[in-house]
Image (cartoon, grey):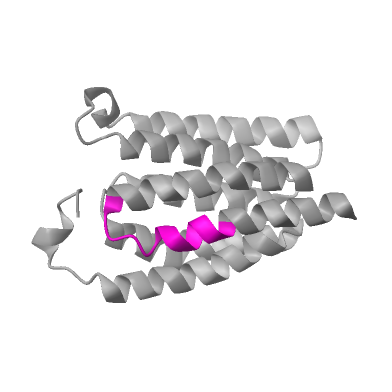
Amino acid sequence: MLYLVLAQAVGFVALALNVISYQLKNSRQLILCRAASDAIYIFHYLLLGAYSGCVTLVFCVANGLICGARNGHNWAEWKGWKWVISILLIAASVTTWIWRNEFDPLPNLCSVISILATSWSAWSGRGKVLRVTRLAISGPTWLLYSVLVGSIPGALSEAIGMTSSAIGLWRYRKTPEEEMDFNK
């Protein structure tokens, strides 16, 4: 029982960072705060034994760190990163499913779809794209994943995170020209 309480407590710490991230105006800060939240979620899902969630989040953290380093670091500007991360994500997810010898298609596909959508939207460098993707794709699929694996903070995080994304969209309405600047 204490182990489950610890797992949920770790998840609530990640939840707090996740919600804060979508209220940050600067797109780079949003991406890096999300990466920090996802890093903590790795431990949460590890404690729950939800290894497909752990594996997918490792790639989401890596993607967030690379995207966060893009402005001013030539190595991070390489457009192939999103393809490399996507291929590694899918390969690692399949390996996890085989290793666990229990392919449950719905939660596993939800985790891959959610992380791929999150990763690809981060490469836009636009807060609006990140927020819309959270509302329309990654949020609903990760919400379903969290419910299926028994993550209370994960499910709350997605519900609150989608709400936070909607609020962020409303708060930071920008013209297309303003949206193009990665530093805003």
Left or right: where does residue 22 sit relative to residue 93? Answer: left
Q: How many marks?
A: 0
Left or right: where does residue 62 sit relative to residue 52? Answer: left
Q: Would you place residue 134 above or below residue 93 in this image?
A: below
Front in this rendered view, residue 24 or 45: 24
Q: Would you place residue 39 above or below residue 153 in this image?
A: above
Q: Would you place residue 118 above or below residue 78 in this image?
A: below
**Residue 79 within the magenta-colored segment of the rendering:** no
The x, y position of residue 109, in whole percent, is: 61, 50
Front in this rendered view, residue 179 or 10: 10
Q: To which quarter of the image does residue 76 belong?
A: top left
- Give the main secondary structure, helix, strand or loop, of the magenta stretch: helix
Question: Quadrant where the N terminus lies?
Answer: bottom right
Identify the residue at horizontal 62%, vertical 68% (top origin): 156
Residue 144 in view here: no
Identify the residue at horizontal 65%, vertical 34% (top origin): 94
Identify the residue at horizontal 33%, vertical 49% (top origin): 29
The x, y position of residue 46, in whole percent, is: 72, 41
**Residue 17 within the magenta-colored segment of the rendering:** yes
Extreme right residue here?
Answer: 1
Residue 159 in view here: yes
Question: Quadrant where the C terminus lies?
Answer: bottom left
- Residue stretch in magenta: 15-27
Left or right: where does residue 161 sit relative to residue 66? Answer: right
Identify the residue at horizontal 77%, vertical 51% (top origin): 6
